[in-house]
Image: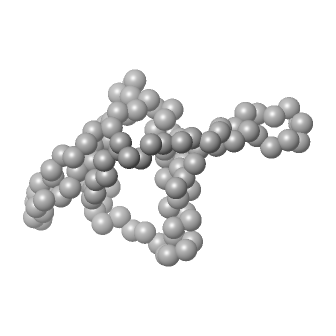
């Protein structure tokens, strides 16, 4: 499990930054499996739609929407750092991860 470490710039004190322990009651959080994610942003928030691909053809993918998660951009940036750190450790241990579908950005 990844943990969030809050760092405050030190003033050359030489002491390590404080670590904040976050305790989550996982009994209340449902578990889902998602093999699809879609990200949208506004100036105020980031939305990640998680889903499960139920049908795929060369021209179309049908997805069952499972959950939408809205967060502030600062939280999304922290999530990005945690994901990058976790995937780096995974790849060091198990091997490279390659996306199974090409990334697409609508402009």
Residue 94: x and y in percent read 50, 76
Q: Quadrant of residue 41?
A: top left
Residue drawn at x 40%, y 23% is 44
Colour logic:
one colour
Residue 77: x and y in percent read 51, 39
Q: Quadrant of residue 40?
A: top left
Quadrant in which the C terminus is drawn: top left
Residue drawn at x 28%, y 53% is 32
The residue closer to the viewer here, 96 or 79, is 79
Residue 48 visible somewhere in the drawing: yes
Q: How many marks?
A: 0
**Is residue 54 positioned above or below 15 on the image?**
below
Residue drawn at x 57%, y 71% is 92
| 8 relative to 5 in the view: left or right | right
| 28 relative to 82 in the view: left or right | left
**Is residue 30 positioned above or below 74 on the image?**
below
Residue furthest to the top in view is 44
Q: Quadrant of residue 97?
A: bottom left
The residue closer to the viewer here, 82 or 101, is 82
């Amino acid at each position: 499990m990844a943990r969030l470490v809050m760092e405050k710039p030190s003033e050359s004190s030489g002491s390590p930054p404080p670590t904040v322990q976050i305790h989550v009651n996982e009994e209340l959080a449902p578990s889902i499996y998602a093999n699809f994610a879609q990200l949208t942003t506004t100036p105020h928030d980031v939305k990640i739609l998680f889903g499960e691909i139920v049908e795929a053809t060369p021209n179309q993918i049908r997805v069952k929407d499972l959950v939408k998660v809205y967060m502030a951009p600062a939280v999304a940036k922290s999530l990005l750092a945690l994901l990058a750190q976790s995937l780096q450790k995974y790849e060091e241990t198990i091997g490279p991860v390659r996306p199974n579908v090409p990334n697409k950005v609508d402009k």
